Image (spheres, coloured by chain):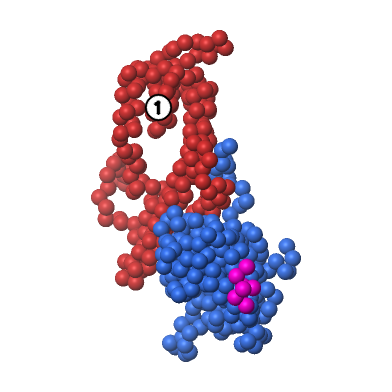
């Protein structure tokens, strides 16, 4: 989860208090990932527990500032220098849904794909329409917002392309006689607690 | 929305190639309309009927069944001469490979449809330059296609498609030969032209480019199987920050 590292990276620029940190996170991500202030304070508590931030001054308005520690700076450098590791694609909810659907009898898999494609394209249309508000960013905040919108657009596009690819693959598999439903396999060795059997009375 | 907003109507349009057992049905009973200010994307696998749909919409081939109506004109009722005139005055085509004439400048390429319609070169140059300005290429008017990048050539093709008030743009994979950023720029120009009062059909296999349309129709085996219409306001994101 990058909220923790993102807040730490912002604190690397100077001490902040909770509300200020939320505002900074917001404007740097184009308000595309809203955080509530409770999340901010919870995260700061954990960062302090782990020795990555520490309490600093309290200003005249009573705002409690937090500042980054040396260990925190090291963590920021490591975060920026390392890749974000994605969740395994095979655990993708949509991939699992299609994988299961293709093994079931009586399911029109082409229709399952089309329903998803329409929803994905609607998402893509909405994102494109939102993005269409500007051609070129005119501020650092707009640039940040566009980067996030672009990433959502490319992710939706990838999903649409994967759906097209799956449709072609299924058509080929069907032609080869492979896209058959899988009946329940009763020959699988049973594990776990055996079912209670009723003893026949003597 | 008035009747005059309707630029194109396909009414139960079918297209069959060949006869008897070897006949191939490319389109089967397609209903589709395009209004002024509307961009409709057509998506589908190869052989789904996308290009056939565009060919029929452009009056290049008559359908084997159904009616094509362009700006209130039933194409089946027009003589060959009337159809050619309607195509020249109302329809603009944009192709993947631009189809610009290499020996003509950008301005001359854009003027050509007007000159074919009987305009003098001098008279045609004014609206042609206006059309080039719309796609932000007014300063390249005297350049030949070979002096222009792919994206610029495609913008010239869009200018040619809309010159002289032609209102229906039929684009077949117009971004296919362009890189991602340039393709987006071309789509942005097409979109703004449509927003200014034209209408268009965009045939594409590229989901990101289809998303510039107001509506996306999905073709499979010559039939429209589904349609996606974006809501005016995104439920996914707040708008551009100030």
Question: Going 68% across and 73% down the picture, which residue do you hit?
Answer: B71
Identify the chain of the residue marked 1, using the numbered disc in the image. A
Residue B49 covered by magenta stretch: no
Query: Which residue occupies the extreme left position in the image?
Result: A189
Q: Quadrant of the N terminus of chain A?
A: top left
Find disc 1 in the rendering and name its residue: A9
Residue drawn at (30%, 29%), measured in percent from left and top?
A: A78
Percent position (x, y) of residue A74? 31, 24
Residue A151: x, y in percent? 44, 45
Q: Is A149 on the left-hand or right-hand side of B76?
A: left
Q: Nearer the viewer, residue B166 or B215?
A: B166
> Residue B132's quadrant in the figure?
bottom right
Q: Image height check: is B228 above or below B19?
A: above
Name the colour assigned to chain A in the rendering.
red
Whether residue B195 sits left or right of residue B103 in the image: it is: right
Residue B123 part of the magenta-drawn span: yes
**Position above or below: A145 against B158:** above
Q: Residues within 10 Å of mark 1 (few under 14, many from 20)?
A: many
Question: Which residues fall within the magenta stretch?
Answer: B120-126
Colour given to chain B in the rendered image:
blue
């Amino acid at each position: 989860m990058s909220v923790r590292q993102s807040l730490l990276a912002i604190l690397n620029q100077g001490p902040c208090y909770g509300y200020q940190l939320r505002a900074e996170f917001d404007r740097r991500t184009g308000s595309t990932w809203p955080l509530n202030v409770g999340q901010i304070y919870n995260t700061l508590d954990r960062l302090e527990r782990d020795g990555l931030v520490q309490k600093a001054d309290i200003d005249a308005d009573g705002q409690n500032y937090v500042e980054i520690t040396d260990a925190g700076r090291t963590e920021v450098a490591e975060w920026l220098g390392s890749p974000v590791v994605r969740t395994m694609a095979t655990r993708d909810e949509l991939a699992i849904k299609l994988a299961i659907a293709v093994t079931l009898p009586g399911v029109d898999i082409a229709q399952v794909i089309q329903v998803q494609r329409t929803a994905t394209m609607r998402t893509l249309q909405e994102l494109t329409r939102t993005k269409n508000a500007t051609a070129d960013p005119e501020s650092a905040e707009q640039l940040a917002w566009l980067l996030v919108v672009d990433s959502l657009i490319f992710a939706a596009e990838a999903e649409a392309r994967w759906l097209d690819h799956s449709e072609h693959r299924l058509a080929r598999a069907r032609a080869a006689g492979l896209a058959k439903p899988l009946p329940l396999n009763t020959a699988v060795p049973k594990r776990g607690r055996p079912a209670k059997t009723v003893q026949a009375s003597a | 929305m008035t009747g005059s907003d309707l630029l194109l109507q396909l009414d139960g349009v079918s297209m069959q190639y060949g006869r008897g057992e070897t006949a191939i049905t490319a389109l089967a009973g397609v209903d589709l309309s395009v209004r002024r200010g509307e961009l409709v994307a057509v998506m589908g696998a190869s052989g789904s009927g996308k290009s056939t749909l565009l060919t029929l919409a452009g009056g290049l081939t008559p359908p084997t069944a159904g009616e094509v109506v362009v700006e209130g004109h039933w194409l089946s009722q027009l003589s060959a001469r009337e159809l050619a005139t309607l195509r020249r005055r109302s329809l603009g085509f944009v192709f993947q490979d631009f189809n610009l004439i290499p020996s003509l400048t950008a301005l001359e390429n854009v003027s050509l449809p007007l000159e074919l319609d009987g305009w003098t070169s001098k008279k045609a140059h004014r609206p042609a330059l206006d059309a080039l300005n719309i796609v932000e290429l007014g300063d390249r008017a005297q350049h030949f296609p070979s002096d222009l990048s792919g994206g610029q050539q495609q913008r010239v093709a869009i200018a040619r498609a809309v010159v002289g008030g032609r209102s229906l743009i039929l684009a077949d994979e117009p971004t296919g030969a362009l890189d991602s950023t340039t393709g987006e720029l071309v789509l942005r120009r097409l979109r703004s032209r449509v927003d200014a009062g034209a209408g268009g059909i965009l045939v594409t296999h590229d989901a990101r480019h289809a998303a510039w349309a107001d509506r996306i129709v999905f073709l499979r085996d010559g039939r429209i199987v589904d349609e996606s219409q974006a809501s005016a306001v995104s439920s996914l994101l707040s708008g551009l920050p100030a």
